[in-house]
Image (tube, rainbow, N blue to C red):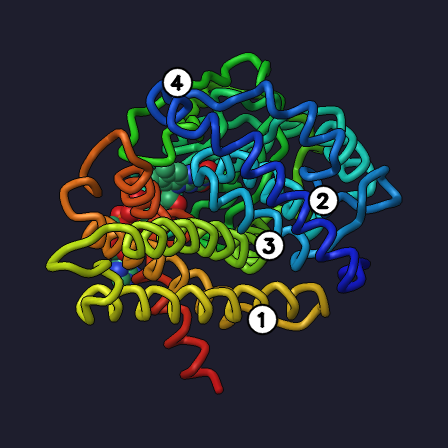
Amino acid sequence: MSAASADERDLIQGLAREFSRREIQPLAAACDREARFPLELAPRLRELGLVNLTVPVAQGGLGLGAEELALVTEEFGWACAGITGALGINAIVADVFHCAGSPQQKSEVFGRLLAGQWGAYALTEPGAGSDVGAIATRARRTGKGYVLDGSKLWISNAPLADFFVLFAKTDPAAGRRGISAFLLQRDLPGLRVGPALGKLGQRAAPASEVFLDQVEVPAERLIGEEGQGFLIAMQVFDRSRPMVAALALGLATRALDEAVAYARQRHSMGRPIIEHQAIGHKLADMAVRVEASRLLVRQAARSLDQGRPNTLQAASAKLFAADSAMFCATEAIQVFGGMGYSTDLPLEKLFRDAKVLQIYEGTSEIQRNIIARELARR
Ligand SMILES: Cc1cc2nc3c(=O)[nH]c(=O)nc-3n(C[C@H](O)[C@H](O)[C@H](O)COP(=O)(O)OP(=O)(O)OC[C@H]3O[C@@H](n4cnc5c(N)ncnc54)[C@H](O)[C@@H]3O)c2cc1C
């Protein structure tokens, strides 16, 4: 449940907006070019309370809710989707422990996040992305715990991570019900993080493969119970998808802001291009999508804070906001004409950054499947 009042929420959003414009935006282009996450921002973000928002008060955090996290994510997403995406991974890691952590695990993990450590969330594999039940990483029971073998692909923040939440099959014969989640230290013998992968967009968020070769894990590193991994992953998606939608909303808003400013000052045929109906209608379509995304994000986040089921809302927000971010970034380039294609302006970065919003945390096709399934259940 969100503990913030409307006034406090405005304050948090204002602080996030200022930080986004003053501190993130100036770094965005260089971090994208260099494929570098700006670690130098981390201490100030912690000092201002703009990260680890949802860590409970009992664990030394701010105990804020999904609505507040969505506002901060939207504001940061306006300035750089890559930097915001990387910051969002720690929130996803925290979600795992909100959903299924033991008291000892919560105290350890929330403490580590507040101290500035980085976590990563390792579900996807070379042979299993949308089909979570098909993961092949194996966790075999031993006398003292488990031995893990396998590999993970596209793990955001793995190059920075101090620890991982990692999913593996404890009972391959049981399909989805045979998946379990583990908390792993980065420095465990047999655990290796591959080099950062080359990416089209969100290049400030490093991602890599993770390899496990006979990695020994004590039994207390199991998160929840054996066989609960799939359920944990689905619960986490309901929490993380509204935040991906919020990030998409920030990006779409930026595309709209840039396009409106340009269309007002660029002239053709004796008038500002915003007065050409073709351009005005593009801006109108973008603006409506931005506002509709905002409402969907708010609805999905609010339900989460109120403890109500939000699977349908989370999938709808993620689908619509991600597709709208791609739409708005594409249309913004068109409004800019040739200059939209230039690497000297932020438009092409918005376009590259938007694409993966339709892919990670469940593709747009998978969101449609979920929405259809939820409708069929009614
Ligand atoms: C930059 C980046 C960062 C990522 N970060 C992480 C991370 O931190 N942790 C993590 O675990 N994963 C991460 N991922 C992985 C991401 O979640 C997966 O790539 C995504 O879920 C899609 O899985 P896939 O790539 O295996 O595609 P596939 O599942 O092989 O899908 C290929 C195509 O088929 C479609 N498709 C598949 N199944 C169906 C179906 N049943 N119905 C309709 N269409 C279907 C898909 O929509 C897609 O268009 C990241 C990926 C990227 C690119």
What is the x, y in percent for residue 212?
Answer: 46, 22
- Which residue: 41% across, 61% down? 321
Asked if the residue at label 1 sits under 8 Å from ligand 1, the reply is no
Q: Is residue 139 visible?
A: no
> Which numbered disc, 1 or 4, marks the residue closer to the eye?
1
In the picture, the disc for residue 299 is 1
What is the x, y in percent for residue 359?
Answer: 33, 49
Quarter of the image where one finds residue 362: bottom left
Tell me the SS state at disc 1: helix
Horizontally, is 325 left or right of 7 in the view?
left
Horizontally, is 112 left or right of 92 in the view?
right
Q: Residues within 10 Å of mark 4 (few under 14, many from 20)?
A: some
Cα distance in 3D space between marks 3 and 4: 31 Å
Residue under circle 2? Answer: 53
In the picture, the disc for residue 194 is 4
> Which numbered disc, 4 or 2, marks the residue closer to the eye?
2
Query: Nearer the N terminus, badge 1 or badge 4?
Result: 4
Tell me the SS state at disc 4: strand
In the picture, the disc for residue 70 is 3
Cα distance in 3D space between marks 4 and 2: 30 Å
Residue type (three-letter) at the residue carrying disc 3: Ala
- Which residue: 40% across, 32% down? 152
Cα distance in 3D space between marks 2 and 3: 10 Å
Asked if the residue at label 4 sits under 8 Å from ligand 1, the reply is no
Q: Nearer the viewer, residue 76 or 94?
A: 76
Cα distance in 3D space between marks 1 and 2: 19 Å
The relative height of residue 204 versus residue 6 in the rendered view (above or below) is above
Query: Nearer the N terminus, badge 3 or badge 4?
Result: 3
The relative height of residue 192 versus residue 242 in the rendered view (above or below) is above
What is the x, y in percent for residue 115?
Answer: 75, 25
Residue type (three-letter) at the residue carrying disc 2: Leu
